[in-house]
Amino acid sequence: MRKFHLAIIGAALLLAGCSTLPNPFAQPKKPPPPAYVVFFEGHSTMLSTDAKHIIADVARAATQNSNSLVEVSGPSTKLAPGYDPRYAQPRINAVIDELLADGVPQNHIAEGSSLSSSLEVDAAGDQRVVLHLVQTAR
């Protein structure tokens, strides 16, 4: 009987140790797609020169890979000083129009909404539109 109890205890310890082993069937976690941030000053919907360069970089990367999708979202936070929701959609549209002008096909652009507070809010209350370049399995 003692051997039976020792066998059960040994089996329980063996099973407990299995929980720390890596799962060979688990899918590896993919890192989140990089975020490209386009800032707008005050109540402007105009793209700055810097913003156009950022969008051109995203467009270039998206057009080099036919499995790329550009997700456009904004504003990133409603906590910014002077936030005005009337500017959110025109800013998103300005970024999308620039992506299209830079050669990204319409079907490779997706509009979303991001309410993340992971980006710092600056004192000037500048609003931003966030672009993510996502690889799809087309």
Image: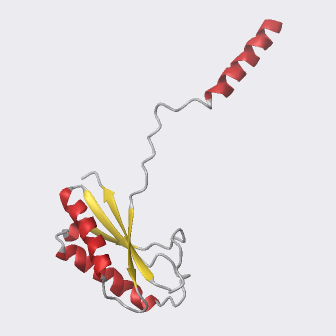
- Residue 49, percent from left and from top: 28, 80
Q: In the rendered view, does 92 fall on the left or right side of 32? A: left
Q: Residue visible at 53% across and 73% down?
A: 120
Q: Residue visible at 83% across and 8% down?
A: 2
Q: In the rendered view, does 22 fall on the left or right side of 69? A: right
Residue 130 in view of the camera = yes
Residue sitting nearer the eye, 48 or 116? 48
Query: Quadrant location of residue 19?
Result: top right
Q: Residue furthest right?
A: 2
Q: In the rendered view, does 68 fall on the left or right side of 10? A: left
Residue sitting nearer the eye, 133 or 3? 133
Q: In the rendered view, does 118 fall on the left or right side of 108? A: right
- Residue 111, percent from left and from top: 34, 73
Say above or below: 71 vs 66: below
Q: Residue visible at 35% across and 84% down?
A: 91
Say above or below: 88 vs 4: below
- Residue 78, percent from left and from top: 52, 82
Q: Residue visible at 76% across and 18% down?
A: 9
- Residue 119, percent from left and from top: 51, 71
Residue 1 in view of the camera = no
Quadrant housing the N terminus: top right
Colour theme: secondary structure
Residue sitting nearer the eye, 9 or 49? 49
Say above or below: 90 vs 120: below
